[in-house]
Image: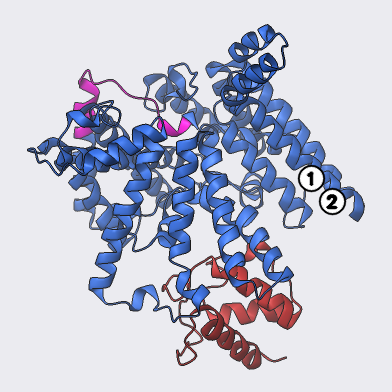
Amino acid sequence: MLPFVFSDIGLLTSWEFVVFVAVALAVYYVLPRRPQNLWLLGLSYAFYVAIAATFAVVLLVVSAANFALGQALQLGEKKEKRWLLWLGIILNLLMLLYFKYADFYVPELRSLLMSLGLSADGLASITIRIVFPIGMSYYVLEMISYLVDTHRRQVTATTNFADFALYAAYFPKMLSGPIERAKTFLPKLAEPRVVDNQLMTRSLMLLVLGLVRKTIFADLLIVLIPPNFIGAADAFATSDLVLYIVASCVFLYNDFAGYTNIVRGISGLFGIELTRNFDTPFFIRNFTEGWERWHISLSRWLRDYVYFPLSRALLRRNPKARALNIIAPSMATMIISALWHQVSLSMLVWGSMNGIYLLSERLPTIRGRTVTPLQERPIWRQVVGNALTLTVGLTAFVFFTADSIAAALMFLGNMLNLSMAAPDGRILVIMTISLVLDALQRRWGEFVFVQGPRLVQASLLAGAALILLLRALTDLQATPFIYQGF
Amino acid sequence: MDLTEIKTKLKQFIVTEIINDPDYTIEDEQSLIKGGVIDSFALAQIGVYVEEEFGIYIPDDDLTVENLDTINQMAQRVSQG
């Protein structure tokens, strides 16, 4: 089970959070610019303390250490800088390893000590005490990117600790990203922020769309999908298993894209625009495209700080080793992505499968064959590409969702029964509406819902508000965002 | 080296080394990545090629679709040094 600890304020759809944001905005708008940053910093730490005070202490220590390392990287000599950078990366990774992977390494360590005939009693209490701070997986990546960019001279290390601490702690993005870069985020804190009509409209659209995605689509889907359909796959018909695994993926998408839209909307109201994390991922035509459209801020981080450096180093070293130069970076990147999510064998299988999928699309390049550009392929090939990508992608997704490899394999084995049952129409309706929204955004852009005539915009807003109101009146429980557990 | 020469070399590299079709014609303003001609992973190859051919290092962070989607953008980036 993924580690979760939070009070209701950590649930962005809770009333506590709504009140928190309303008060935050009211004070923010009357403050002059410089105190605005301090206000946001204070709010962010108050928000984190409300979830768990110890998490805030860990964040403060991480921020202070990286701020100091950034200063040293800015001012140090060339030779020093290299080891300072590695020191910073290692410290950040150790922090993540210590907190995030305790569930994995403590039992291993215990059995190792016991096999050596040593007492492992002390380790039992350690497991209880190590609780993973929510958001750490995200802010540690931000810290590493800050150090690397400072070393590359892509960023000038800031001398303003309050701004730097806000970069790490900014409450809309702290729990589950988007993973922001200091290069683009810090200048936003230094510049005057204007919330004009356009930004206000876009932000409110994101907020409403996010709430619909999360509280309607995701929260309803999670209730309709049987909780243990993978573990108890033999109790379901094949057609139901297909429906549930597709619905689980649509649920995860609406849950995470909904969260991202909500925080981007809230942040926009403060005049700070955050990175987009999803771009209509069910309309992809191959895996490379999928990589660029799902959890974009993580994909780009992995591309810029793992794939590109590794790929370029290999290409420089031996440009002729075409296969190695293509295979190693893709596989390493996808395996690191899997480990970032969770240390488990089934997650490693998920990462490896995605790595292999990416490689399969690069096979023609390795063999020296002509690659027809994606847009120039006939429509039927693009449609088949979409269907194939989603099918094999969902096969890998079984390993992402399952508790173990055995459970995933049993699930896939049960798929071969080819038995049929009447589908749950409610799931089909929700998935269809979700995909129609995506299709509109795919065709006319992310902000399609605020581009049409005023009457259409007002009708859409009224419709969404009514649906959300009805949802608020139901006793359906709000579920925590899944990605807060990573 | 002038812009025309840089563009010719970049086009040559992309059609022979990335899409493996020397007969493919690339326009200066053609959207290569957004248009699906090459994918963003290929930017690593372009980065190393630019480094070796023109002696210009483009940082990983600058190897983005926004910066290098067309031959014109790539050539401009190379000429900036």
Task: Give, as a three-letter code, the residue at label 2.
Answer: Arg
Tag count in the figure?
2
- Helix, strand, or loop for circle 1? helix
Q: Decide: few, some or many residues near mark 1? Use Cα within 10 Å; few <14, some 14-19, many ≥20.
A: some
Residue A47 spot, x, y in % from top left: 54, 23
Residue A270 spot, x, y in % from top left: 51, 39
Q: For chain B, what colour was chosen?
A: red
Q: Which residues are magenta?
A: A467-484
Residue A370 spot, x, y in % from top left: 44, 82
Task: Give, as a three-letter code, the residue at label 1.
Answer: Trp
**Residue for point 61% across, 68% down:** B44
> Vertically, is A292 above or below A105?
below
Measured in 3D between alpha carbons, the distance from the residue under mark 1 to the one under mark 2, in whole angstroms, is 6 Å
Which residue has dot 1 on it? A86
**Residue for point 62% across, 93% down:** B4
Q: For chain A, what colour was chosen?
A: blue
Q: Are marks 1 and 2 in contact (CB under 8 Å)?
A: yes
Of A104 and B71, nearer the camera is A104
Quarter that holds the N terminus of chain A = top left
Is residue A213 shown in magenta?
A: no
Q: Chain of mark 1?
A: A
Q: Decide: few, some or many residues near mark 2? Use Cα within 10 Å; few <14, some 14-19, many ≥20.
A: some
Which residue has dot 2 on it? A82
> Vertically, is A173 above or below A201?
above
> Vertically, is A395 above or below A118?
below
Residue B63 spot, x, y in % from top left: 61, 66
In-image side of B71 versus A92 (left or right): left
* Residue A205 shows in this picture: yes
